[in-house]
Image (cartoon, rainbow, N blue to C red):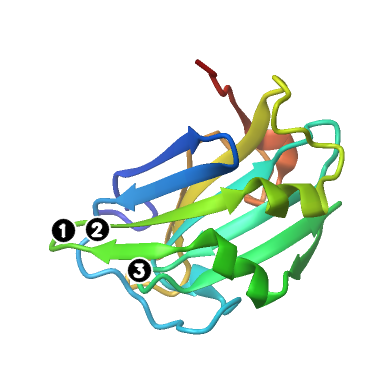
């Protein structure tokens, strides 16, 4: 496979409940690199699945949720291009759970409404406004470095931290 063409099949799913957003990320990848173990460690150097969320589309701020196959999580806030890791104690309410199988791996986690409202007080969970965000797969220090996204990233050089490239998530209520 020519360098730069490796893009393992990857998916993301969202489920909205009355008090939280549940996220499931998965990837067809055997033997994922998973060196990082500590909260807020650079999991993007490992085989990594990421979800970025902007619940208030008229703001350029967004939350980063990044995971390796051990379930090590980096939780951050990006404000106008300036990134900062958030207190690791906030990760406990996300209940991250990683699963590794023979030829695939994934992570499930929760984004409580209280976490979103802590950083986006204008956001109202009962509102019908669409959420914006993106799903990513990367592996900066893997045997074959790779990068991919659900919503096309048009910024060059490629920068996943580009809220103008986020897609729209429409939440249906029944």
Residue 166 position in % (x across, y down): 65, 35
The CA distance from mark 1 to mark 3 is 12 Å
The CA distance from mark 2 to mark 3 is 10 Å
Label 1 residue SS:
loop
* Relative to 154, 97 lies left or right: left
| Residue underneath mark 1 | 103
Sequence-wise first label, 2 or 3: 2
Mark 2–mark 1 CB contact (< 8 Å) = yes
Name the front one of labels 2 and 3. 3
| Residue underneath mark 3 | 69
Residue 24 position in % (x across, y down): 40, 47
The CA distance from mark 2 to mark 1 is 5 Å
Sequence-wise first label, 2 or 1: 2
User: On screen, 154 above or below 24?
Assistant: above
- Seen at 51% across and 68% down, the residue is 44
Residue 122 position in % (x across, y down): 86, 37
Disc number for residue 157: none
Label 3 residue SS:
loop
Circle 3 packing at 10 Å, graded few (<14), some (14-19), many (20+), is many
Query: Farthest residue toward the left?
Result: 102
Quadrant of the image for the N terminus? bottom left
Circle 1 packing at 10 Å, graded few (<14), some (14-19), many (20+), is few
- Seen at 35% across and 68% down, the residue is 69
Mark 2–mark 3 CB contact (< 8 Å) = no
| Residue underneath mark 2 | 29
Label 2 residue SS:
loop
């Amino acid at each position: 496979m020519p360098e730069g063409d490796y893009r393992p099949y990857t998916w993301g799913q969202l489920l909205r409940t009355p008090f939280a957003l549940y996220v499931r990320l998965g990837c067809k990848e055997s033997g994922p690199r998973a060196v990082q173990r500590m909260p807020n460690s650079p999991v993007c150097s490992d085989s990594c699945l990421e979800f970025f969320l902007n619940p208030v589309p008229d703001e350029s701020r967004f939350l980063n949720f990044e995971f390796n196959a051990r379930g090590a999580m980096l939780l951050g806030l990006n404000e106008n291009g300036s990134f900062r890791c958030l207190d690791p104690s906030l990760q406990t309410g996300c209940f991250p759970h990683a699963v590794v199988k023979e030829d695939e791996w994934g992570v499930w986690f929760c984004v409580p409404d209280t976490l979103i409202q802590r950083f986006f007080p204008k956001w109202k969970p009962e509102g019908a406004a669409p959420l914006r965000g993106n799903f990513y797969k990367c592996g900066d220090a893997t045997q074959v470095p790779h990068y991919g996204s659900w919503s096309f990233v048009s910024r060059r050089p490629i920068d996943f931290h580009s809220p103008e490239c986020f897609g729209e998530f429409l939440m249906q209520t029944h």
